Amino acid sequence: MTDWTITAGRVLRDGALHHADLHLSGGVVATQATPAARRLAAEGLLVLPGIVDIHGDAHERQFQPRPGIGMPVAMALRDSEAQMLAAGITTAFLGVTLSWEPGLRSVQAWRTLLAALDAARPHLATDLRIHLRFEADNLAALEEAVADIAAGRVHLVAFNDHTPGILRKLGSDSAATKYAERAGMSAAEFRELAERIAAGRDAVPAGRERLAAAARAAGLPMASHDEGSLAERASFRALGAAICEFPMAEEVALAAREAGEAVVMGAPNVVRGGSHLGWASAAPLAERGIVTVLASDYVWPALLEAPFVLARRGVLDLPAAWALVSANPARAAGLADRGRLQPGLRGDVVVVDPVRRAPVASFCAGRLAWVSSEGAARLAA
């Protein structure tokens, strides 16, 4: 493995930016350069911990760029990783929805993705992990999900429950068509399927208990999704879900923080200045310490942009804002070996042009995994 010294940049360490060199050796941050280390000149650049994306489903656009139109999964994974590296993401939890719906979010798509990821791992630079977003009503796939958790193929479990919302929207022909196209069936067939699935909701609580028990046995972090009430947060907390992602009410987020839990919202929300669904604005909640983690949600580059947006607002400085996309998500996911540039931790680094707010180079476990044309010009033997 090639060792590296990133010279003369401003390195984010211990909550502040310092003019310093950063050394990478044997895949980790080192205290000094090795004689054979290659160099990247970082004058005028920021040297930041690699981004940890705890929740992102932008990969679905590579798998199915148009409704019902699938692409080869191996190609889609390669494309997804390339885009992540170019956005400074060095650890990514692929948010894979395992639903009762056919098509993109089906159990067959789940199996295909896991197999493709197993085959791709020897060639990946990014640490790609699986964030299982299990739909509450998908009881037919419960035991398969439990088996995959036990086999170590899942790294984070989230409790989804989109069925009630889907049923409410199916009265609209346009909404029904959208869901049906994604599933590869007619609107009438999709309506019939959704109603049939919803008829078995009495078994959902037991299914959640089963899934949570499997996650606890495997030592996995758990997240609850789109909670709208304190009662929901309390019920998922009782299952062991210590990550509250995309809470629909501020009081839910406050309750989670008071319990010492991580609260996740989307970086696109910060970049756009508000939620595309009309929910709470993430930026002021982050400034108040209520939102502790930002995730890509559906746009990978938003994760790098969001800390600069927050710093420009003037409440958080860049080091504090960057923790929302590095140290904090790593901690929430139980990854103590990354998210900070400390000796002995993984050499996950993104070098950034602060003027353009653009990545120049990404290092994963000490390996130069992506470099821009500007970065290439800064490389030296």
Image (tube, grey):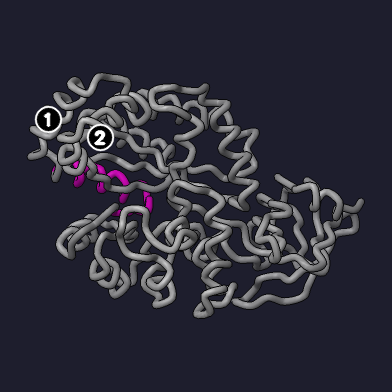
Q: Is residue 18 above or below residue 168?
A: below
Whether residue 10 is situated above or below residue 102 in the rendered picture: below
- Relative to 75, is 4 on the left or the right? right
Image point (25%, 43%), residue name = 211
Three-letter residue code for mark 1: Glu
2 or 1: tag closer to the N-terminus: 2
Asked if residue 37 shows in the view, the reply is yes
Asked if residue 143 is among those painted magenta in the image, a careful observer would answer no
Q: Which residues are magenta?
A: 206-224
The N terminus appears in which quarter of the rendering? top right
User: From the viewer's perspective, is the residue at label 2 or at label 1 nearer?
Assistant: 2
Identify the element where label 1 is drawn. Answer: helix
Query: Taken as a whole, is the magenta stretch helix, strand or loop?
Result: helix
Q: Secondary structure at mark 2?
A: helix
What number is the disc on residue 11?
none
Q: Is residue 142 visible?
A: no
The residue lying toward the viewer, choosing from 11 and 114, is 11
From the top left corner, tell me how far across and down residue 154 is, in percent: 41, 41
Instruction: Please name the amino acid that badge 2 sits on.
Output: Ala
Q: Position of residue 228 (x, y in %)?
A: 21, 59
The dot on residue 175 is: 2
In this rendered view, identify the residue nearer to me: 271 or 154: 271
Residue at the (28%, 31%) spot, across then down: 179
**Which residue in the protein does label 1 denote?**
195
In the displayed structure image, the side of residue 25 where residue 227 appears, left or right: left
Residue 39: % across, % down: 85, 57
Q: Residues within 10 Å of mark 2 (few under 14, many from 20)?
A: some
